[in-house]
Image: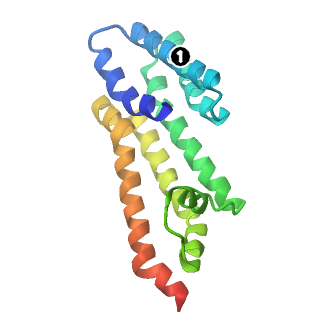
Amino acid sequence: MSSVFTLLFAPSFILLIRFYDFKTVTIIYIILAIMLFSTVLITKKDYKELLTPSIYIILLSFAYFFGSFDTVKIIPVFISSIFFTLFLNATIQKKALVYSFTKKFYPKPLQDNEIKFLKKSDFYWAIVTFINTLIQLILVFYDNTIVWAFYSSVGWYILFFVALIAQIAYGKFYAINKMSS
């Protein structure tokens, strides 16, 4: 649910401020974020899911009180930095985050070389998420709100998809074969 909210946030916010004043739109999104927070809390899903709506509530409240669109634009930076922090932490503590995700969602058993490759992938994703965070931060100071809205909703998915394809290709055609020799 949080991912849908995040996906639709930037473009719908831009669209709504064309028709309504900034503070009204901000209040609408604060209410939506509170509803999302409440839904996650009531359904007792993983409490880590409360982090995203909490960031929205806090930063949208600041945006409302200071009348600052830049505060709204920085929300995706915070969300991106969470992903970066997760992968950086996994890299430092050798948690093999990518491997644990792959194990959950990949139906076929993995070979030893594939497991080795996946266990070393957290650093790669730390770099990708760092680049994403930097792009998000640059877009806060870039005047074109359409570019910001596009990247904050769909653009980072494209970046992650391209990074995933690059990782899979590198793994299949080079790294896994090299590990087996």
At 33% across and 23% down in the image, what residue appears? Answer: 12
Disc 1 residue type (three-letter): Met
Q: Residue furthest right?
A: 93
Rendered image quadrant of residue 22: top left
Number of callouts:
1
Location of residue 91 in the rendering, given as x and y in whole percent from the top left corner: 65, 61
Rendered image quadrant of residue 126: bottom right
At 42% across and 76% down in the image, what residue appears? Answer: 172
Q: Residues within 10 Å of mark 1 (few under 14, many from 20)?
A: few
User: With respect to residue 169, does 55 lie above or below?
Assistant: above
Does the rendering let one see residue 58?
Answer: no
Location of residue 64 in the rendering, given as x and y in whole percent from the top left corner: 50, 12
| Residue 173 located left or right of residue 111 | left
| Residue 97 located left or right of residue 149 | right
Location of residue 143 in the rendering, given as x and y in whole percent from the top left corner: 33, 31
Q: Nearer the viewer, residue 31 or 113?
A: 113
At 49% across and 45% down in the image, what residue appears? Answer: 133
| Residue 20 located left or right of residue 179 | left
Instruction: Identify the secondary structure beneath mark 1.
Output: helix
At 44% across and 28% down in the image, what residue appears? Answer: 5
Does the rendering let one see residue 160?
Answer: yes
Please name the residue that numbered disc 1 is placed on.
Answer: 35
Q: Residue furthest bottom?
A: 181
Q: Nearer the viewer, residue 111 or 35?
A: 111
| Residue 3 located left or right of residue 55 | left
Color theme of the render:
rainbow
User: With respect to residue 74, does 106 lie above or below?
Assistant: below
